[in-house]
Image (cartoon, helix red, strand yellow):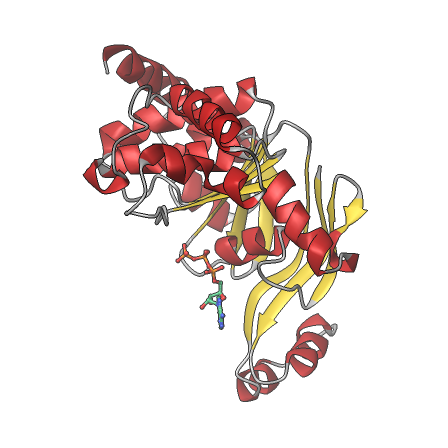
Amino acid sequence: MIELEDVWKVFGKDENAILAQARSAEPDPAALERLGAVIGVGGASLTVKRGELVCLMGLSGSGKSTLVRLVNRLLEPSAGRVRIGGKDILALGRKALRDLRSHRIGMVFQSHALLSHLSVRDNVALPLEIRGVARTTREDTADEMLVRVGLDGLGDRRVSALSGGMQQRVGLARALAANPDILLMDEPFSALDPLIRYDLQTQFRALSRELGKTTLFVTHDVDEAFRIADRVVLMRAGRIVQTGTPATLLAAPADDYVRRFVEHARPLAASRHEATTIRAIA
Ligand SMILES: Nc1ncnc2c1ncn2[C@@H]1O[C@H](COP(=O)(O)OP(=O)(O)OP(=O)(O)O)[C@@H](O)[C@H]1O
C-alpha cells in the first residue's frame, strides 16, 4: 500500500550538491558541513502492506517525522520514489495530490490542531464539509466516528472543554471521518498521561485492525511501538537501521543501537496483557 524506494530528504544550502555528496561512495564529512547539510532521511526503502500497522521508532532527530511527511508529500523528497497503492505520487499534479490527501490519507499529530470555536461534531465533520458532503450526512458520519473512538454523545461539546486525551480522540475521529485507507500518525499520544495513553494505544490498535487501515505510526517509545505494531522500523540519523516484528528486534537486533533501544522494553506478553487489563478497568 505504501512503498518507499531509496527515498532521500536533505536540508541545506544546495540540495542537489548535498544529495550528490551524501550519495557518493565515500561522502566527505567536511564538504557536507560546508554545505550546511542535514540528512533528514537517507536512502529509505520500506513497504507497508495493506492493513499493516508499522511503527517508526528512533531517537529525536533520527528522521521519523520527515519520513512520514514524505508519504503524503507534505515534504517533497530530494530523490527516490514514493508509491501509494502502486501509484507514483511524485507524478501527481496539485489537484490529484489534494484528492489523495483528503480522500486516501488521514493524518493525526501530537498537537491535535482542532478548531476550538467549533463543536466536537463540527470538528470531526470538517474534512467532509471541505469535500462538499451534505450537512446531515456529514453529521451522521461524525457521530458514528465519535462512537468508534469512545466519545459517544459528546458531539455538541466545545473541544476546548475536553481533556487532552479526549481531544486526541476527536483528532482521530476527524482523521477517520474521511474514511482514508492510510493513517499517518506522528506521536499522537505522546503528550498524554500514561494510563490514558495505554488505553488509547489498545483501542487504536483494535480500531485500526477492525477498519483495515494501513498505518504508519511515529513514536520514540519502544513500549508503545511493541504494544501496537505489526512491524517496527528503527531509524538512526536518517537511515533505516532495522525493520522487523517486535519479536525479531528483540531476538536478533541488527546492531548495538537496536539492542540498546529494545533492551529496556518491557516483556511483550506482559505489556500486552497489562494494556488489556487497564482497558477492562477503565
Ligand atoms: N525544515 C527543516 N530544515 C532543516 N532541517 C530539518 C528540517 N526538518 C527536519 N530537519 C532535520 O532533519 C532531521 C530529522 O528530523 P525529524 O524531525 O524528522 O526527526 P524525528 O526523528 O522526527 O525527531 P523528533 O522525535 O524529535 O520529532 C533533524 O536533524 C532535523 O533537525
Camera-nearest residue between 253 and 139: 139
User: In the rendered image, which quarter is residue 192 located in?
Assistant: top left
Relative side of 46 to 253, left or right: right
Left or right: where does residue 55 sit relative to residue 148? Answer: right
Q: Position of residue 41 (x, y in %)?
A: 59, 61
Q: Is residue 207 above or below residue 160?
A: above
The image position of residue 21, as x and y in percent, is 68, 79
On the question of residue 263 being in view, the answer is: no
Residue 73 higher or lower than 53, as above or below: below
x and y, in percent, of residue 8 in the image = 66, 63
Q: Is residue 188 above or below residue 246?
A: below
Residue drawn 35% across the image and 39% down it: 189
Q: Residue at x 47, y 19 (%)?
A: 206
Q: Quadrant of the N terminus?
A: top right
Tell me which corner region of the image, top left, top right, bottom left or bottom right, holds residue 148. top left
- Residue 158 in view here: yes
The part of the image, by quadrant, that contains residue 254 is top right
Q: Nearer the viewer, residue 159 or 214?
A: 159
Question: Is residue 138 or residue 59 the one in the foreground?
Answer: 138
